[in-house]
Amino acid sequence: MSLPPSEIPQGAIRFNTDSQKLEFYAQGEWWVMSTDTPNLGRGVESTPGPRGVFPGGRNASNTMTDDMDYINISSTGDAQDFGDLLTDSFEAGAVSSSTRGVKFGGRVFPGSQYQDNLEAYTFASTGSIADIEDLRTATVFSCGASNETRGLIMGGLIHSSYGGSWSGGWNNIDYITIASFGESIEFGDLSFDHPGGMNQASSPTRGIFAGGFAPHNGSPGAPGAPALITTKIQFVTIPTLGNSSSFGDLTSLTSYTSGAGNSVRGIYAGNGDTPQTTIEVINISSGGNGVKFGDLEASRYAMAAVSSPTRVAWGGAHSYSNDISYIEIATEGNAVDFGNLTSNRGFQSGCSNAHGGL
């Protein structure tokens, strides 16, 4: 039986079947036990268990936030405060290694200023955020895929000012070296023209991104100017520079979807075109169309997704919810309650130190 965090004694030890490692409970968190010589006698290394971080977002009052929450993906319960971004931000993306997360792009009000900054944080150290450089172009609705070394920043939208025409889609794919400081570098191009509102899943060699919309003579959803939605799934080979290739299709036109997974399966949920509950799954290594996995508890989109080798968890929503729900990746079925974020919000980013690309 799983104990709630408040009842776990300090110093407890468990075997985590997700990571196949021994863990030690201290300061409200499970930590991986180290056998490295420098750590002998101390018992733990500075690497937490599967941790998901949710940076930024906006609330029902259209107020941006710099809040960052985190959860331990292998348990259940409410999110805790991680720290603050350097700037308020929503509609941003994120990539991560097993030790470091990087939030990129997004926008802020007033004036709907698009952001080009890269902000990095260490999963084991709450409250420590650094500006590590800039994107080549300020974007929103970009999505990221990553392995242990490289983070890919794919697509997005660019425009001059809030309320004006969208300048168009950013079909470029850029990359960063996650452990380093430096500006993003060109990787290749998307092979289709619906670069906004996509989402992703990763293995160590592949980044898979699905759905999305293209601007159509104005802001997506504006009267007389609907967004152009797609079912397309594309992939890139993360270690090799180049353009994206066709992978398959989702079961329906999808935007603002939220994706994550392990190294074998990619899981996608949420739809901003026609809000729905459907969760879809793909096999990352083989290619092909998405198939139904299960359902969310309610129609949601603009969530943030984080994952471990066995779970995907989604936090927040377009309706400015604080709900967190999750599924077990190996078993088709419906999402169930995990806990709550520290505040109601949506359009935030998410990443973890145990996703499928690691």
Image: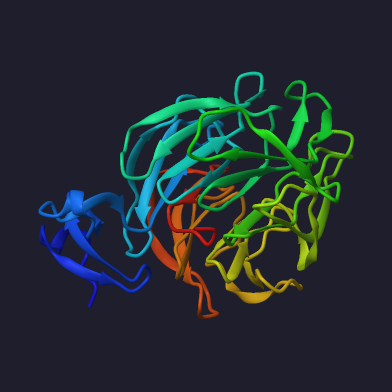
**Residue drawn at 35 percent across, 31 percent down:** 128
Please indicate, yes or no, whether residue 63 appears anywhere in the rendered image. no
Image position of 158 (left or right of 103): right
Which x, y percent locates residue 184?
Answer: 64, 32
In this orientation, which residue lies closer to the viewer: 187 or 337? 187
Image position of 129 (left or right of 257): left
In this orientation, which residue lies closer to the viewer: 242 or 211? 242
Q: Is residue 243 above or below residue 206?
A: above
Image position of 294 (left or right of 186): left
In this orientation, which residue lies closer to the viewer: 47 or 105? 47
Q: Quadrant of residue 247?
A: bottom right
Which x, y percent locates residue 330?
Answer: 51, 78
In this orientation, which residue lies closer to the viewer: 142 or 252? 142
User: In the rendered image, which quarter contains the N terminus?
Assistant: bottom left
Extreme-front residue of the structure: 37
**Residue drawn at 14 percent across, 63 percent down:** 7
